[in-house]
Amino acid sequence: MPSFTRRTFTSNLAATSALAAAPLLNALQTAPASGPRPNILWLTCEDTGPHLHACGDDYSVTPNLDQFCTRASLYMNAWSNFPVCAPARTTIISGVYPPATGAEHMRSMTHMPAGWKMFPGYLRDVGYYTSNNEKEDYNLEKPEGTWDDSGKKAHWRNRTANKPFFSVFNFLITHESQLRTRPHKFVHDPAKVRVPAYHPDTPEVRQDWAQYYDNITTMDGQAGQVLADLEKDGLANDTIVIFFGDHGSGMPRSKRWPYNSGLNVCIAVHIPEKFRHLAPKDYLPGQKNNRLVSFVDLAPTMLSLAGVKPPDFHQGEAFLGPHATAPRSHVFGFRGRMDERYDCVRTVRDQRFIYIRNYMPHKIYGQHLDYMWETPTTQVWERMYKEGKLNAAQSKFWQTKPVEELYDLANDRDEINNLASAPEHQATLRSLRSALRQNELKIKDIGLLSEAEIHSRGKGSSPYEAGHNPKTFNAAGILDAAELASANDPNAVTKLTKALKHPDSGVRYWAAMGAVIRGAKATEVMREALTTALSDANPSVRIAAGEALAHYGTEPDAAKALEVLMSLADPAKNGAYLSMQALNAIDASGLRATPFKARIRAFPKTDPNAPDRVKTEYVTRLEAALTH
């Protein structure tokens, strides 16, 4: 088993710090060849897919943004990378995929390597005034000097005269929470809603969709006001303006799911004539652009527009400015813990197809999340499933997942016809599967570890440094273990049993998860190895083995396993991340957890050492789910 002491990182930290410092010097020393730098204005909104009228959605009413889009290039194949706000915004601000920084889980908190900056910090280094009005929501600690001003009053108007600015205005009205507020006066007629094939056609669903579009119309007015202010201040000809939402719609199976419906947004970019030399050849004002771009590309793109060479650690590719690269062939998506429930999904798409790899296929799509159940659509959708009133496409959300999914976006916009087993699509399946694996190895996806182990391996440096150090993270070995654990391999149980003795705890974790994924027969065959794993030196391995035995083992084995899980479920003693993993495992045991309700009820509700973002909320929800 690797050693994760401070000594392990000493030599690597020096090397990594040197590498981090080099791109910083590049950023400070690189400037445009001549002339002024452009102002850059971002208009961003919550939970909004490509549903502007200008994007081709005839149901939508967005006159201000439609007018803006007549002079903007619309990147219709833009991807958020994450289908939920915090990791999506973490991707944007860092220029690095959150599974590489250990920041993929909802409202987790970790930090970047010393010397790194979030991209507005690099803009400040070359003279920009940076303002953010007002949402941040990063899963990474924000370095000093990221923003000149971040808050409700932040505005380009607060800068020193003649200083170029990078200003963000974020509109909250389109957030998921706002599509379910009642009472509501409709602008859009619910009867005219297009209900996607995966949703049941009910009044509740139609009302939620219509209210979503109503909120987009309200947001359109707010965006129009900011654009009017820019014009009023005489800055329109000097300002590049960019509009986008932070991921797909706030409706269930869009938000939180790395389908195209959860990741696809429109990024609309207007470059005024004065700075048109910064536009690539595929920039066509007033037209739709099919170039693949993603949120990890935004940081290097903004630096490129300012004449700054992006730092070497950025994992995105600039698509505008002098440092723009050739168009991408693929974009990538991810899903980790969503609020209080764990999952592990990775996705990739090209121009036509999306491929989804489910590393925890035993979990249903619609795991219960307290916050999402406040939406009427979620409630009626689940109720109708339990009543047997849904068709196959609508029922899928409440069932366990296949290992692989493949959808043809050109002919199946709702992603309901899984082509993964279709003979005529095997070449596409293999190509996208290979592209996904290559990217996983390239970015060093430390998110394949349990959340608790991401933090433990990053202790003394950062998860990114741990992931990029082959002595502390065997990227290929752990990816192989995750693939084996979830794959339809007839020899997997024998291999998994052997892997439970592997020196790497990440491999042992996935070996135990392989028993959880396969259920009772595999757990019976692996019983002896799983029982031994209940005493593993790594607590995440103990939890995974405990979940298999607690759920599928004999009564005596289950009782022993539940005691192990209970010993790790107290957040004050074990930390929030282990507590959440253990409580989820206990919950999976069903009625076998009933005798433990009183003890769970007596647990503390908080990890006193956790960041505020994860201190109480998710542990409390899980404890409540187990003791109701």
Image (cartoon, rainbow, N blue to C red):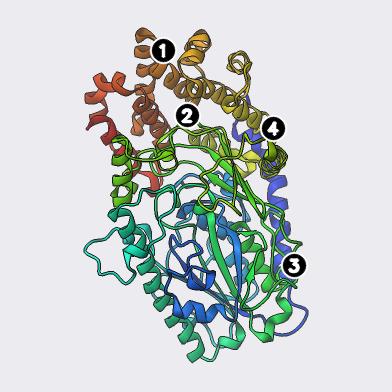
Q: Residue at label 2?
A: 362
Q: Is disc 4 placed on a helix, strand or loop? A: helix
Q: Mark 1, residues whose alpha carbon is within 10 Å: few (<14), some, or many (≥20)?
A: many
Nearer mark to the viewer, of 2 and 3? 2
* Amino acid identity at mark 2: His
First in residue order: circle 1 vs circle 4: 4
Question: What percent of the width, then of the height, locates residue 105?
Answer: 48, 44
Q: Is disc 1 placed on a helix, strand or loop? A: loop
First in residue order: circle 1 vs circle 2: 2
* Amino acid identity at mark 3: His
Could you give the CA–CA distance between mark 1 and mark 4, rounded to whole angstroms? Answer: 31 Å
Looking at the image, which is closer to me, 88 or 613? 88
Q: Is disc 2 placed on a helix, strand or loop? A: loop
Q: Mark 2, residues whose alpha carbon is within 10 Å: few (<14), some, or many (≥20)?
A: many
Mark number, residue 553:
1
First in residue order: circle 2 vs circle 4: 2
* Amino acid identity at mark 1: Gly
Nearer mark to the viewer, of 1 and 4? 1
User: Which quadrant of the figure contains the N terminus?
Assistant: top right
